[in-house]
Each structure stands twice: as structure tokens, then as C-alpha cells.
Image (tube, rainbow, N blue to C red):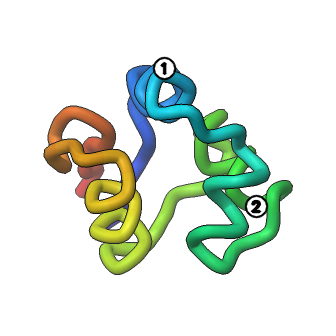
Amino acid sequence: MRIWAKATLKILRAKRGYTAKALAEELGLSRQWWTDVENRRKSTSPQTTQNVCRLLEAQFDELFEIES
């Protein structure tokens, strides 16, 4: 199972006032790794998705999709 970011993730992140760097720092991740997730070069973990949804006040299916 892989979890991929949807295009809406970047849009909502910006609307909530986060830069990619600021959100990555809040999550304890590197900016480069987080940028790769947002650009669908890397998938992410269930724990990270939970944290992102909490910080951005969004539902999982608004921001991410699962590939089996």
C-alpha cells in the first residue's frame, strides 16, 4: 500500500499559511523530503498523513489517495 498526495494538498497548505519548509519543520521532516511527497515523487506514511490532516484541519481523502 502506498499513500500519495493529491494536488489539493499544496493548495490547502498555502491557504492555511504554511510554506513547504514550515510544514516540513512542523512535521519533523526535511523540506526536500516533504516537497517530494507533495510532487508525488515519494509516498508517505499513515502517521505523517494523520499529522498533516491535523495541522491543515482536513480529511484524509481531501489530501491523499491510497494505491494498493
The spot of residue 4 in percent (x, y) is 42, 47
Residue 42: name its quadrant: bottom right
Residue 48: name its quadrant: bottom left
C-alpha separation, residue under disc 1 versus residue under disc 2: 18 Å
Name the residue located 66 percent from the left edge and 79 percent from the top edge.
Answer: 28
- On screen, 31 above or below 11? below
Q: Which residue is mark 2?
A: 33
Dot 1, crowdedness within 10 Å: few (<14), some or many (≥20)? few
* Count of numbered labels shown in the rendering: 2
Q: Earlier in the sequence, mark 1 or mark 2?
A: 1
- On screen, 22 above or below 65? below
The spot of residue 52 in percent (x, y) is 39, 58
The spot of residue 30 in percent (x, y) is 80, 68
| Amino acid type, callout 1 | Ile
Which part of the image, by quadrant, shows the C terminus? bottom left
The spot of residue 16 in percent (x, y) is 45, 33
- On screen, 16 above or below 22? above
Q: Which residue is mark 1?
A: 11
- On screen, 45 above or below 6? below
Dot 2, crowdedness within 10 Å: few (<14), some or many (≥20)? some
Compared across the picture, whether 35 is left or right of 43 comes to right
Name the residue located 15 percent from the left edge and 45 percent from the top edge.
Answer: 59
Q: Nearer the viewer, residue 65 or 18?
A: 18
| Amino acid type, callout 2 | Trp
| Tag shown at residue 19 | none
Compared across the picture, whether 54 is left or right of 19 comes to left
Residue closest to the far front: 17
Q: Nearer the viewer, mark 1 or mark 2?
A: 1
Name the residue located 61 percent from the left edge and 40 percent from the top edge.
Answer: 18
Local secondary structure at mark 2: helix
